[in-house]
Amino acid sequence: MLTALIGPVSNLLGKFIEDKDMKNKLAHEVATMAENHAQELAKGQLEINKAEAQHKSIFVAGWRPFIGWTCGVALCWHFVLAPITIFLCAYIGVAIPELPTFDMGSLMTVLMGMLGLGGLRTYEKQKGLTK
């Protein structure tokens, strides 16, 4: 949102300030201010995530692992277990009811987000930022 405001603010500077050096300096400061604000928001979220992960209660620290395992089980069912089950039942001649399916679009959105967070966690561990 802040990035969308930088262009209009820079255009307003051009209308009120005639000195090009001063105008460029102020435009740079506005852009830098927006970037600094975004970085501060990200740092704040990282601190919240760190506090959650260190909490002793599974209900606070355990929600990410729960979502990860849930996505992993659903992915395993959809791509491995269900096709094998259908094949084996057809091979031995057993009629089975229709097996449940998942909305893979929603599941993949959550899973890819979790994998991205997992990648960030791996990066933090490699840099020695966390245990």
Image (spheres, rainbow, N blue to C red):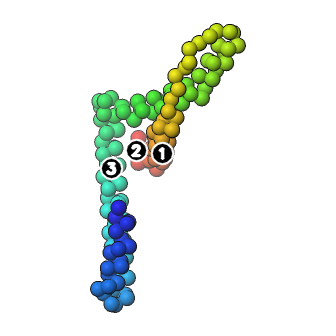
Q: Earlier in the sequence, mark 1 or mark 3?
A: 3
Residue 42 located left or right of residue 72: left
> CA gap, disc 1 to disc 3?
15 Å
Q: Position of residue 123 (x, y in %)?
A: 48, 48
Q: Residue at x 34, y 34 (%)?
A: 61
Do residues under tags 1 and 3 come within 8 Å of each other at their CB atoms? no
Q: Residue at x 62, y 10 (%)?
A: 95
Whether residue 111 appears in this view of the structure is no
**In what element is the residue under mark 3?**
helix
Q: Which residue is mark 1?
A: 116
Q: Which residue is mark 2?
A: 130
Tell me if residue 99 comes above or below residue 27 in the rendering.
above
Q: Which residue is mark 3?
A: 45
> CA gap, disc 2 to disc 1?
17 Å
Q: Residue at x 48, y 41 (%)?
A: 109
Q: Quadrant of the C terminus?
A: top left
Q: Quadrant of residue 48?
A: top left
Do residues under tags 2 and 1 come within 8 Å of each other at their CB atoms? no
In front: 73, or 106? 106
Q: Residue at x 45, y 29 (%)?
A: 70
Amino acid carrying label 3: it is Gln
Q: Position of residue 117 (x, y in %)?
A: 45, 44
Count residues near mark 3 (Cα–Cα under 10 Å), then give few for <14, some for 14-19, many for 20+. few
Q: Earlier in the sequence, mark 3 or mark 2?
A: 3
Amino acid carrying label 2: it is Thr
**In what element is the residue under mark 1?**
helix
> CA gap, disc 3 to disc 2?
16 Å
